[in-house]
Image: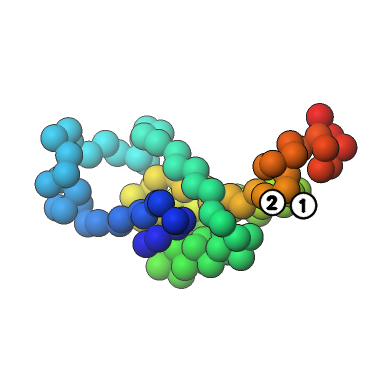
Amino acid sequence: MMVGEHATIMFVNHATFGTYSKLPMGDPTKFALALYNNTVPARDDVDTIVDTALAEGAIDANDDDAHGFMYSRAFFDLDGHGWQFMWVDPAAAEQGQEEVTGVS
């Protein structure tokens, strides 16, 4: 799945994963293995990606986090790994949050 001009995410089954890793799989129901945060180019992309994951069986991790200049949502995949997708207004990224929102 393409999530940006230079970023792709590949979801595979456990057997295929085993061909990529020399280490055994950990149990994400007992340990936090990783949290994946991804920035996407458009605000609507956040909803598209997360809604697709939820439709395929992922679990919603929290409510959306909307601040005007930034929007994010998160889910746990079928193996329990945490994924967050975030959009940041390009003007806010360029100018800095304080200048755009008046908040430091």
Left or right: 97 with respect to 33?
right
Q: Tell me the quarter of the picture where residue 31 sits.
A: top left
The amino acid beneath tag 1 is Gly
Q: Residue at x 35, y 40 (%)?
A: 28
Q: What is the residue that sits farthest to the front in this orientation?
A: 94
Q: Badge 2: few (under 14), some or many (20 or more) residues near its Cα, within 10 Å? A: some
Left or right: 98 with respect to 55?
right
Q: Badge 1: few (under 14), some or many (20 or more) residues near its Cα, within 10 Å? A: few
Q: Tell me the quarter of the picture where residue 42 sits.
A: bottom right
- SS under mark 2: loop
Q: According to the image, label 2 marks what residue?
A: 89
Q: Is residue 54 visible?
A: no
Q: Is residue 97 visible?
A: yes
Sequence-wise first label, 2 or 1: 1
Q: Can you tell which of label 2 and label 1 is closer to the viewer?
A: 2
Q: According to the image, label 1 marks what residue?
A: 68
Q: Residue at x 75, y 39 (%)?
A: 95
